[in-house]
Image: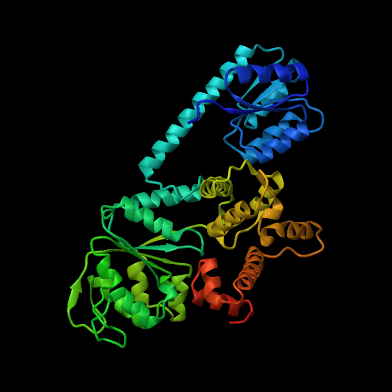
């Protein structure tokens, strides 16, 4: 961890503010200061401070509001309250709201510096504990999240990776199903073997069969030589079958045998091939419903659904949005060689309100676009995609009470419809290109267009 803190001082008494700032700078701390409660609130909403020192009584926005904003926008920020003797009881209330500690005027600068040293030690221990937990749990840097739901996923990965049992990962497009499959593989005893990935929804039946099981020379037109399939290539490793709910009945039947017996024949061949492979599947569909509809084999469903893992959508774990934003800002800042202070308060507000029908993938794309399009030191609302900027208009309309509140499902469908429509326009109507941008198969895009009444 960095050995000094970035500290925000919010104090309207000039002598007090200057004295604190000079003392902290002398100790090597990075300091930002303001005499305005309103400006302090803006800085807290848009910045990322390790500690905030604020007077409890300020003109306009008071210290309690700054404390609450700090805990909302950056829960790890420690807040020290400065108070007069007459308002000590209010300062104690502030500690109940999450303040680190308080100082009563007049106080010695040594007392404040000692408090900051304790915060520094606490943060170092916190980061060390987080690092150790990540090592123990085998978290990978691509999977970002502090919510209870993501912590539960980490625990499942821990347990599952110690077995060879077939796993089935459920989740909407863009939730990170492939990342979870990778984590399971690289934590398992098969980590030195290959992880072979197959997007089942992106290939037609005949091509998918040849890809999975391989083929013999001359087995069909264009088969000029023997080709090993993905299952053979995954021998002693793991195969990840994404969008397993999209495969045809014929491929389902052949897959069932592989899952049961770990045996198959290449297309056009007679030799039975034995394999040692861990199978992980993923789907955005409810396979139980697909079984009831007759679209998916019941026996295959029970073979695959041995260990189900359900990844929550991003709108179900809103507390992970800010850590994800920070992760993507660092990622694209490094890639684009562009230093950036962060988000403006308004941009942050819009990103927190948006329901993300495209989940983490959509958030990542939004930050990448904002980094590429933005020109200032902070990302502004105008740098964000139109569908995120328009969330404010939707919120304002709802707040008037003149229209009925839509159900969450309907609201998400509305954003999804608009998102797909804009992507199709961006791709000049090319569905293959649009599907690539959206991160879904062409078949899924076709189904969505049909569902929303657009051109299929």
Q: Residue furthest bottom?
A: 221
Compared to residue 416, the image places residue 20 above or below, namely above
**Taking 251 as reference, is 21 above or below it?**
above
Count of numbered labels shown in the rendering: 0
Residue 395, position as x, y percentages in the image: 74, 57
Q: Residue at x 49, y 51 (%)?
A: 149
Where does residue 183 sit, x and y in percent of width and height?
37, 53
Residue closest to the eye, 422 or 395 = 422
Q: In the drawing, does residue 157 fall left or right of residue 30?
A: left
Task: Where is residue 316? Give x, y as percent.
Answer: 57, 55
Please state which of residues 367 and 93 is positioned toward the viewer in this rendering: 367
Quadrant location of the C terminus in the rendered image:
bottom right
Say whether residue 296 is visible.
yes
The answer to whether residue 118 is left or right of residue 402 is: left
Residue 345 image offset from top left, x and y in percent: 70, 44
Residue at image coords 64%, 16%: 23
Q: How is the image coloured?
A: rainbow
Vertical relation: 212 (above or below) 328: below
Q: Choose top left, top right, bottom left or bottom right for residue 257.
A: bottom left
Q: Is residue 431 left or right of residue 68?
A: left
Q: Is residue 256 visible?
A: no
Quarter where residue 16 is shown? top right
Q: What residue appears at the point 57 percent right and 27 percent down from the top-left corner?
A: 5
Q: State the residue in front, 8 or 382.
A: 382
The residue furthest front is: 337
Query: In the figure, 7 relative to 113: above or below?
Result: below
**At 76% from the left edge and 59% from the top edge, which residue is drawn?**
393
């Amino acid at each position: 961890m960095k050995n000094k803190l970035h500290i925000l001082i919010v104090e309207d008494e000039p002598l007090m503010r200057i004295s604190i700032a000079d003392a902290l700078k002398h100790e090597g701390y990075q300091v930002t200061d303001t005499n305005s409660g309103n400006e302090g609130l803006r800085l807290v909403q848009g910045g990322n401070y390790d500690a905030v020192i604020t007077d409890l009584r300020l003109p306009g926005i008071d210290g309690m509001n700054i404390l609450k904003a700090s805990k909302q926008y950056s829960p790890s920020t420690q807040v020290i309250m400065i108070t007069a003797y007459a308002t000590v009881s209010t300062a104690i209330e502030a500690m109940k709201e999450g303040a680190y500690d308080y100082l009563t005027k007049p106080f010695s600068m040594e007392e404040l510096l000692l408090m900051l040293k304790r915060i520094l030690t606490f943060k170092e221990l916190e980061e060390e504990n987080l690092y150790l937990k990540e090592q123990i749990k085998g978290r990978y840097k691509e999977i970002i999240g502090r919510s209870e739901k993501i912590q539960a996923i980490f625990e499942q990965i821990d347990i599952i990776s110690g077995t060879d049992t077939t796993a089935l990962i459920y989740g909407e497009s863009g939730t990170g199903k492939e990342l979870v499959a990778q984590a399971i593989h690289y934590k398992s005893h098969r980590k030195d073997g290959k992880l072979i990935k197959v997007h089942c929804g992106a290939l037609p039946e005949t091509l998918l069969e040849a890809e999975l099981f391989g083929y013999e020379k001359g087995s069909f037109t264009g088969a000029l030589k023997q080709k090993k399939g993905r299952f053979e290539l995954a021998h002693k490793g793991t195969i990840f079958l994404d969008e397993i709910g999209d495969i045809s009945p014929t491929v389902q039947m052949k897959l069932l045998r592989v899952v049961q017996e770990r045996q198959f024949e290449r297309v056009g061949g007679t030799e039975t091939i034995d394999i040692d492979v861990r199978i992980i599947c993923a789907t955005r569909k409810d396979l139980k419903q697909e079984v009831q509809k007759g679209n998916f084999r019941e026996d295959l469903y029970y073979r695959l659904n041995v260990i189900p893992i359900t990844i929550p959508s991003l709108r179900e774990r809103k507390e992970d949005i800010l850590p994800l934003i920070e992760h993507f800002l660092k990622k694209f800042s490094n890639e684009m060689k562009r230093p950036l202070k962060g988000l403006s308060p308004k941009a942050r507000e819009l990103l927190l309100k948006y329901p993300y029908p495209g989940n983490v993938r959509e958030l990542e794309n939004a930050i990448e676009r904002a980094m590429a399009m933005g020109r200032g030191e902070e990302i502004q609302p105008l740098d964000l995609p139109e569908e995120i900027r328009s969330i404010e208009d939707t919120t304002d309309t709802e707040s008037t009470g003149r229209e009925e509140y839509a159900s969450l499902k309907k609201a998400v469908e509305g954003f999804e419809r608009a998102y797909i429509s804009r992507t199709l326009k961006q791709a000049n109507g090319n569905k293959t290109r649009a599907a690539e941008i959206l991160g879904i198969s062409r078949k899924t895009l076709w189904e969505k267009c049909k569902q929303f009444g657009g051109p299929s």
